[in-house]
Image: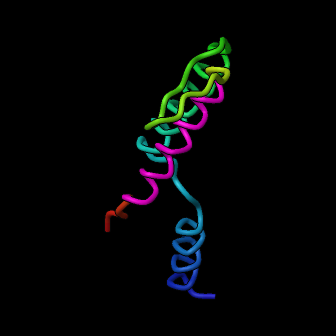
Amino acid sequence: MTDRNKVKGANAAQQGRRRVTVRQIIAIALAILAVIFIAQNRQEANVSLLFITVTLPLWITLACATVVGIAVGWLFHRRST
């Protein structure tokens, strides 16, 4: 095997590894904070949407809002090139 082939093989191995970006670290930290916030808020809350009002545990309301936020972010996500 020539030196040139060894370098190509090493570059291919390095490209196969994924680096954790600052953006991913921030996203993970925010997700952990959201889970902690939801877990600490378990009292009942009145939730109104248009003409409907229901009483739910606050953690369910917060979890639903978090899921909706993630869905909206995913739908509007644009991958940078």
As drawn, 15 above or below 77: below
Residue 69 screen position, x and y as percent: 46, 43
**Quadrant of the image occupied by residue 63:** top right
In reply to whether residue 36 is colored magenta, the answer given is: no
Q: Residue at x 61, y 20 (%)?
A: 58
Left or right, 22 with reference to 9: left
Of residue 76 and residue 54, the one placed in the foreground of this image is: 54
As drawn, 71 above or below 15: above
Quadrant the N terminus occupies: bottom right
Of residue 2 and residue 16, the one placed in the foreground of this image is: 16
As drawn, 3 above or below 52: below
What residue range appears in magenta? Answer: 59-76
Q: Which residue is drawn at 45% across and 47% down?
A: 21
Residue 60 screen position, x and y as percent: 65, 29
Left or right, 22 with reference to 2: left
Which residue is outermost to the left?
81
Quadrant the C terminus occupies: bottom left
| Count of numbered marks | 0
- Main SS, magenta region, reads helix
Q: Which residue is drawn at 54% across and 28% down?
A: 53
Q: Which residue is drawn at 50% across and 52% down?
A: 71
Left or right, 73 with reference to 19: left
In reply to whether residue 64 is colored magenta, the answer given is: yes
Residue 8 screen position, x and y as percent: 52, 80
Residue 35 screen position, x and y as percent: 62, 27
As drawn, 31 above or below 2: above
**Quadrant of the image occupied by residue 36:** top right
